[in-house]
Image (cartoon, helix red, strand yellow):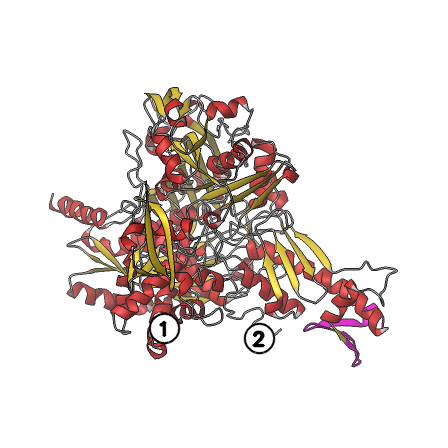
Amino acid sequence: MTISVAMTVNGKSVSGKVEARTLLVQFLREHLGMTGTHVGCDTSQCGACVVHVDGQSVKSCTILAVQAEGAKVLTIEGLAESADKLHPMQEAFRENHALQCGFCTPGMVMSAIDMVKRHNYQLDEATVRRELEGNLCRCTGYHNIVKAILAAAPAMKSAGV
Amino acid sequence: MTAATGIGARVLRTEDKRFLTGTGRYVDDLPLARATYAYFLRSPHAHAKIKSIDISAAAKMPGVVNIFTGKDLVDAKVGGLICGWTVKDKHGEPHKAPAHPVMAVDTVRYVGDTVAMIVANSHDEAKDAAEAIKVDYDVKPATIDLATALGKGAAEVHPEAPGNLIYDWEIGVKADVDAAFATAAHVTKLDLVNNRLIPNAMEPRAAAADYDKGTGNYTLWSTSQNPHVLRLILSAFVLGIPEHKLRVIAPDVGGGFGSKIFCYADETMVCWAASRVGRPIKWTAERSESFQTDCHGRDHVTHAELALDKDGKFLALKVETIANMGAYLSTFSTAVPTYLYATLLAGQYTTPLIYANVKAALTHTAPVDAYRGAGRPEATFVIESIVSKAAAEMKIDAAELRRKNFIPSTAFPYQTPVALQYDSGNYPPIIDEAMKIADYKGFEARRAEAKSRGKLRGIGFSSYIEACGLAPSQVVGSLGAGVGQWESAQIKFNPTGNVQVLTGAHSHGQGHETTFAQLIHDKLGVPMDQIEIIHGDTATTPFGMGSYGSRSLAVGGSAIMKAADKVIAKGKKIAAHLMEASVADVEFENGVFKVAGTDKNVPLGQVIFAAYVPHNYPHADTEPGMDENAFYDPANFVYPAGTQICELEIDPETGTTEIVAFTAIDDFGNIINPMIVEGQVHGGIVQGVGQALFEAAVYDNSTGQLISGSFMDYTMPRADNFPSFKLGYKVTPCPHNPLGVKGCGEAGAIASPAAVMNAVHNALAPVGVKHVEMPATPLNVWQSIQGAQRQAAE
């Protein structure tokens, strides 16, 4: 049995027919072809699938597509203002070499943006490290991810994002 | 070339933009029209006979397209998976080579062994159908525990390997070592377990395949670190598809760490079944499958003894190791605990006599093969643990004992007693720098301060060396490797002057698209944005060996330099013609050909254009076009070395360990992009610390179930487990490759387990703890402290 679902993804209205068991991440990747959001585990541990749902960071492997009915979803593909103008968090990841294989990166960036906002653009290293508990990276040793997030916080504030 | 973007510059990565905007293209991201989806039914038992498999109910499930079992492969005469490195035992006999069917036929040998492949219209339908397959198993006793795998009464994994012994191998002369031990003033003995690890690249393994009925061509997309080698194995040994009819593409790959080197059952099945199903097939491992079926790493049980004279000079080292192979021999498994392990047991030291005996054992567990460092972390852990233990026993400062035994900088090239000839190095300045940055002098004050807070503070050294940049083909061939270990490069200029550089190496996070472009930019003066690095597709790139063993730059980069030399040589001929000068008078610098001593010059772009529009051209001795190939076979391994110092605090009440400072000083030879190199070191350190403090692949010894089978049960290192690291470099260029580079990909993981565990032992010594095994979890440490206190009370 399929269920109709409609939501806004990166500012565009989208809809589709899904099974009740279809996860939000499956809807994004398989129905909409938006493969920027990744799946790295099956226990909601790794955080590669983090997106924003109505402004909050959510592991998109942990909610059903139907639960996002009517929601505003933001994914990594919708973050940059334009092809040439990255979001300050994306820019900071690039400038600080905070990614290697790139697989955890979409989730890292989405989590990091949420983290900066929740802490009102004021973060210290210990807070960033603690807040990253829901995102695994096997390449970077986290060192440069932490640097990037600390650098992005004031940049996001001054850019007003 | 500019200082901002050439060799040595911190150039931001070209590949980052696609990864940061969600436009990377990993295997699972491929849109394949009319795709089917595969799911594998896997064995729930460690050891069982398959009495029957009934697929009749499953075949009728919604969406099911095909179901295949091991019998189908037997009927189709599909070959088994292979082990590509023949190790000869101490009697000169080749290792035992049990059959490795792609899917189990009548016996399953580990939890996760492949039993059936279900192909359906969706992943969920395939998975639903798998539940309807009825397999009648006759469960047999299993051998799980490595320590008893070779003992009497252990259940046999394969009839071809009696007593579960794959080989009994040795290096060195035991009698000479024993004689040296007889003269020793002090002998330090150490028993240790090198814990089994699960690689866990963040992208699970995946494969997709398509078969073109019209041409008979197969395309396999795989999360492979070495697509050409995968194609070679599948063609020549397993599927029999002629090499030119099989295209293997490894697109963006989300980390490998060794686990994606090997030829696996599932990707083999996806490729084979594509022609039978008649539609494309996609498969992506669930994380649980990755835990169960990715090749695991490490897993040694070792006894070591170090003989010292009264002044602390090392006289001899004796090592006995049992190495776990798992249930089947994976692609390079046999080489890891022999030629990548025992040959490194000299470390940075002048130990004149070394004997090592390695027994490789089968168990009913997942196959074990190369994982970041592959043998070298195990060797470093043995040496650096026993050296620190000897220092503590002889009451010599740990740094001083190391310094006393370092190979002097004047002794290179240095022939070790275990086959390798170190090409270059200078170890004392490295440890000096590390001690300065770590403020070693101030440690005792910090320890006292920590004690006042109830904490046990410790400091630990690890001075590692590794042989990487795999490898001189003749050398590895003489040791049993089934392949050469050169690398290839092709520099293909387009008429408009931009350039495509095709490499046989493969990037799965290392940043080749940037580092390799820096080489071309520096050497040929082509702007960075006019250079494209292409890798990972057997249809476009020259045959190459892929990336592992920290070889991409030392071997693949050297191949690029060689091809660039050919571009310059040919360009000189064309430029000489254009400038009406003698070739001998033409020089090339910063992208411009010049006639020496004159102001005549012609830029590379004009030469390239002339090569493709050869109206005015030296046709007599020069072919049109600018497309140069090179293959580079290294003269020796490269030998990065360094010292790490770990400082940590243990809370004796909870057993919790906190790393408070971590210093790494490395000699990687010349550095092309320090930003990328630092990233490699950070990641390596964390993987090694993961082994020391958190990670362990745990099987239930009675049932063979993988207890640490998810991220809920297997502790991955997380951001809050670490401080920021302090890094530094000392440079002794590699004398035998054109870039003077060594390798940096594995160093961090090779050295750090010993640095951490030496610090743990240093911290716990005051409370009487003698030995803690990895991982030093809070429970493990707390129990060690309790045990020591009980012993003291008795």
* Magenta-colored span: B581-601
List x then y, in percent, for residue A12.
39, 62
When the figure is inspected, residue A46 is found, relative to residue B358, above or below; the finding is: below
- Identify the image quadrant of the C terminus of chain B: top left
Query: Horizontal and vertical percent for residue B486?
Result: 62, 48
Q: In this figure, what is the number of numbered marks?
A: 2
Q: Nearer the viewer, residue B212 or B82?
A: B212
Would residue B2 appear left or right of A64 to someone viewing this image? right
At mark 1, the secondary structure is helix
Label 2 chain ID: B
Which dot marks residue B3? 2
| Vertical position of residue B211 compared to residue A120: above or below | above
- Asked if residue B572 lies left or right of residue B167, the reply is right
Q: Nearer the viewer, residue B518 or A86?
A: A86
Give the quadrant of residue B213: top right
Q: Which disc is residue A151 wearing?
A: 1
Answer whether residue B789 is magenta in the image.
no
Image x and y of residue A35, in percent? 43, 54
